[in-house]
Image (cartoon, rainbow, N blue to C red):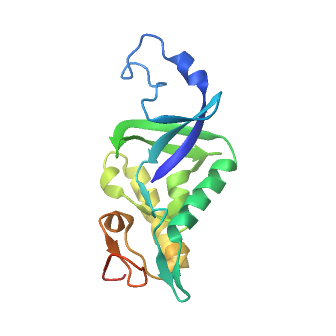
Amino acid sequence: MRMTLVLALALAACGGAASQAEDPTLIRADGRAIDGDTVSFDVRIFGADAFEKRQLCRNTNGCWPCGKAAQDYASKLLKSGSSTIRLTGKQSYGRPIGTAEIGGQDLGESMIAAGLAVPATSYLKNDPERAQRYLAAYENAEARHAGVHAGYFIDPAKWRRGERLSCEARGKSSRER
């Protein structure tokens, strides 16, 4: 899942002569200017796979934009308070991977609990406590029929590979859960 995080240009002052491996305050990522003194960097959220922006899911009312709902939910959480980002040192799709907490609340876990992301536990082998929390959040969302659990959906990874629900206009149909 792509998350846009706004960072002040003050990060540039942390650079010095240290390499990224020696200085965990450095971020190596593609950035873009929001305005003259504010930049934005893309960071993928560790261990959670949210529905893609253009992805549709199905409930009793038909297709609905679950990917846009995931984006809106993440945006709302990010605007609710200051974020703490912890980079893992790994990359995915050319972007750094990290965890994000907003007011002490784990963004990935919140997205999963809202039924707008699925746990990516294969990436959490070295963080079993987080994997357990994410699986519990998923099971709870499923039991409450939250978000996508109120109907059918394609796993985001499968959707990126081209699988689609029968109610989506293009692409191949997939077996629905």
Is 85 located above or below residue 20 in the figure? below
Can you name the residue that lies furthest to the right here? 80
Residue lying at 62% horizontally and 54% vertically, measured from the top left: 75
Image location of residue 78, percent across then percent down? 63, 49
Against 167, residue 148 (above or below) is above
Q: In which quarter of the image is the N terminus?
A: bottom left
- Please provide percent x and percent y for residue 84: 58, 38
Viewer-proximal residue, 39 or 13? 39
Position in image of residue 164 (x %, y %): 36, 76
The residue at 35%/57% (across/down) is 121
Nearest to the observer: residue 22 or residue 156:
156
Q: Residue furthest top?
A: 17
Coordinates of residue 73 in the picture (x, y in percent)? 60, 60
Reply above or below: 5 against 64. Answer: above
**Residue extending furthest bottom?**
60
- Residue under the image location 65 percent in, 27 percent down: 37
Picture quadrant where residue 6 is located:
top right
Q: In the drawing, does residue 165 fall left or right of residue 110?
A: left
Q: Is residue 57 left or right of residue 156?
A: right
Left or right of 10, for residue 168:
left
How many marks do you count on the picture? 0
Which image quarter holds the C terminus?
A: bottom left
